Image (tube, rainbow, N blue to C red):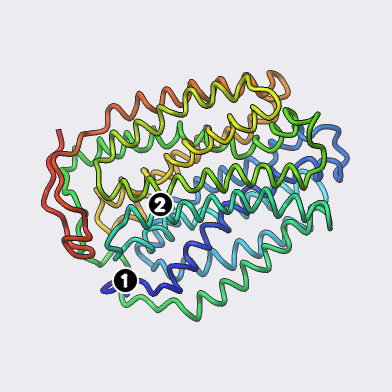
Amino acid sequence: MQDQALRPSVSLLLNVAHTLDHLFLLIFATAVAAIARDFGLARWEDLMPYGAGAFLMFGLGSLPAGRLGDHWGRRQMMLVFFFGIGASALLVATTRGPWTLAAALALLGCFSSIYHPVGIPMLVQRTRRPGAAIGFNGFAGNLGIAAAAISTGMLVEAAGWRAAFVVPGLACIALGLLFWRLAPRESEPPAERTHKADVQLSRGELARVMAVLTVASASSGLVFNLTTNGNGQMLGERLAAQVSDPSTLGWLLGAVYAVASLAQIVVGRLIDRYALKPLWLAMVGAQVPMLAAAAVAPGWWAWLALLGSMIVVFGAIPFTDATIVRFVDDRMRSRVAGLRLAIALGISSAAVWALGPAVKAAGFGTLFAVMALVALFSAGVLLLLPHEGARSERAGATGAGAPLPQSPLR
């Protein structure tokens, strides 16, 4: 399979898997108020810290997942992803209290951690235009965030919060069976392949890129986790006078995510044509005023400010994977991605633990103002990213998987 591009059906399943990965991680945050009532808690903020284990394991599990993806095989690990995340979602639906819920969510986070260091390298390993592939894949992933807002609100209203885990859990298992039938077996693990990165770096240069990438990912991950886990409750608070039912709020939030996800397709295409650093800086820099506006906007203005914020937050997502594709050989991309994710997501998972207590103590206005400062810090870190020299036409002109002419960094 390493000598040819993936079949469209397999690429489609890998993109759908990204949708499911983000959907499962946000079901709890979307349904937390209903779960808190069912467990007899007075406030949703008191239950929110119990979901932190899922995001902690989502980060820490990336390290072994990446190593297994490179040395055992990406197809095998994706099968573990489909069946494991589906089964753990069914387990979440059986829980009866905060601590059993926390344990089941942490298990779900373990299986969720497989996708990013394994599924994305599998998707781009022979593509001719990795930026476009990563951009569309990011769009698919964030459709999962939109689907979590919409489907969870509808299922909670129609059948209770447990159904919000059961229905997608069964769908994930069914898709795993389909992937097992369609994805061809790998003739060798990725670690034994010889394809080179587009831009060849020295060890010192690569270490510099990875350090910047990890720190920027951690700070950006804080913003991403705080927004995607808190936006539903934020809109419920700001639109309390205009909208009251969970289903309508779910559609409003889903619309934000669906529109914002389109930014990743645009960014992905730009990545194939231009240097990474100025594009990434522009996208992260734009987060600062948008998050600041969301901190103070009332009513429907809050919805518009949130829409603008999520466009630039989502638009920044493709850069991390594109950086790895551009600078890291395919034979070790899963391990590099796993290491970066383990550190960055392990740190940013603290956002989920802190979200409820922070909002309870200071409110959403202060939270969004702090996120604007975090975005400013991210932009400062990205200034340390090396500049790429003059670039020739991207891989579409040089052949899939073939290394581009070396592009010196300065």
Task: Give the amino acid type for the residue marked by disc 1 in the picture.
Answer: Ala
Q: Is residue 126 above or below residue 52?
A: below
Picture coordinates of residue 245, whole percent (x, y): 82, 42
Tell me residue 311's x, y (percent). 50, 38
Q: Position of residue 206 (x, y in %)?
A: 23, 41
Point 72% across, 28% down: residue: 238
**Alpha-carbon neighbours of circle 1 within 10 Å: few (<14), some, or many (≥20)?**
some
Q: Which of label 1 and label 2 is nearer to you?
A: 2
Dividing the picture into quarters, in which one does residue 117 lie? bottom left
Label for residue 41?
Answer: none
Report x, y in % for residue 369.
56, 20
Which mark is first along the chain, 2 or 1? Answer: 1
Q: Gap between marks 1 and 2, in whole Å?
A: 17 Å
The C terminus: image quadrant: top left
Residue neighbourhood size for the residue with mark 2, other residues' Cα within 10 Å, grouped as few (<14), some (14–19), many (≥20)? many
Residue shown at 78% from the left, 59% from the top: 163
- 102 or 400, nearer to the observer: 400
Amino acid bearing label 2: Gly
Q: Which residue is mark 2?
A: 135
Write the residue at 57% across / 76% down: 177
Residue corresponding to mark 1: 5
Quadrant in the picture for residue 9? bottom left
Helix, strand or loop at mark 2: helix
